[in-house]
Amino acid sequence: MGALDDAISVLGCFSFDEPALSQAELTRRLGRPKATVSRVMRSLRETGILEFDTERRLYSPGIRLFELGQISQANHHFLDLVHKRLQDICDIGGHTGYITVFDGADLIVLRVVRGSSPLAIATSPGYKTAAYATSNGRAMLALLEDQAWRQRVPDPIPYVSATTPADHAELRERIGKIRASGRSYSSNETVEGVSSQGTAMRDPDTQEIIGVAISYPASLGTDVLKERIAVLLDQMRTDLLRRTVLSRRAAT
């Protein structure tokens, strides 16, 4: 391992649960020679990456890391982070991705990531559709309190397709399942022959709800494909929400 690898390994030992560690503990965890760890710790301390508490004899992340974190946060708007992660997912499967926000009772497409597959399905930014009739729209509604989402859904619900919730009771049941699993599906709803899987999260700065969907031909919607996309969306949401938590902790 090089010096940079050693430094990265040291920094990877710290967490919110263990924000301060002794050199002996770091040496034990890394399985590296004591002299090597000592040299790395000295360099990290001298550059402000780590701080050393002389009374407790413990190391912890220093002010320089905080400064670098603030620079990173300032240069990565949340919507751009969502777009990048969605692009990664679309690159894997060749399918088409969408980023959406609410527009009254509808959702509106902000960004489209066009898939590489010859069967890629795409609409244009600015496209609107009923939130209750899409996978990402229902995931977005699931982040609202019951009274709030009811205000965004017409009553009675206009007919869209046989697979779309027919009334508020059926929609409430779907939303309950999304809240429990974090996963949302649709098939043959707003567009015949198209399936999609969606998720939603809040922008940590504005609290605006952002929806994400992956669309593909319904004929390709095997259980294997659905699970693969679901896992990728789960991981994206988890990673972005973790970043939100870290940003808030850093701010306080």
Image: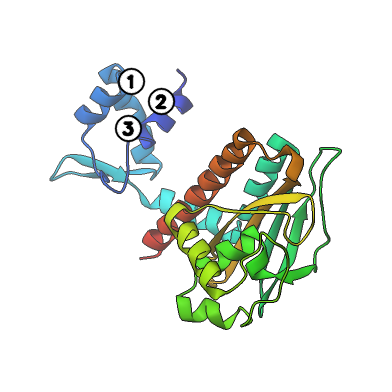
Residue hosting label 3? 41
Q: Secondary structure at mark 3?
A: helix
Identify the amino acid type marked 1.
Thr
Residue 207 in percent (x, y) is at 52, 71
User: Do labels 1 and 2 touch, CB within 8 Å?
Assistant: yes
Q: To which residue does mark 1 refer?
A: 36
- Left or right: where does residue 44 sit relative to residue 150? left
Q: Nearer the viewer, mark 3 or mark 2?
A: 2
Mark positioned earlier in the residue sequence (1 or 3): 1
Mark 2 = which residue? Answer: 6
Whether residue 233 is visible here, answered yes or no, is yes
Q: Work out whether mark 3 precedes mark 2 in sequence or the reverse, and give the earlier one.
A: 2
- Between 181 and 58, the residue placed more toward the observer is 181
**Residue 210: % across, % down:** 60, 64
Amino acid bearing label 3: Met
Residue at the spot x=75%, y=62% of the render?
Answer: 190
Which amino acid type is marked by label 2?
Answer: Asp
> Can residue 204 be seen at all in this image of the molecule?
no
Q: Residue at x 55, y 72 (%)?
A: 206
Q: Quadrant of residue 50?
A: top left
Outermost right residue: 118
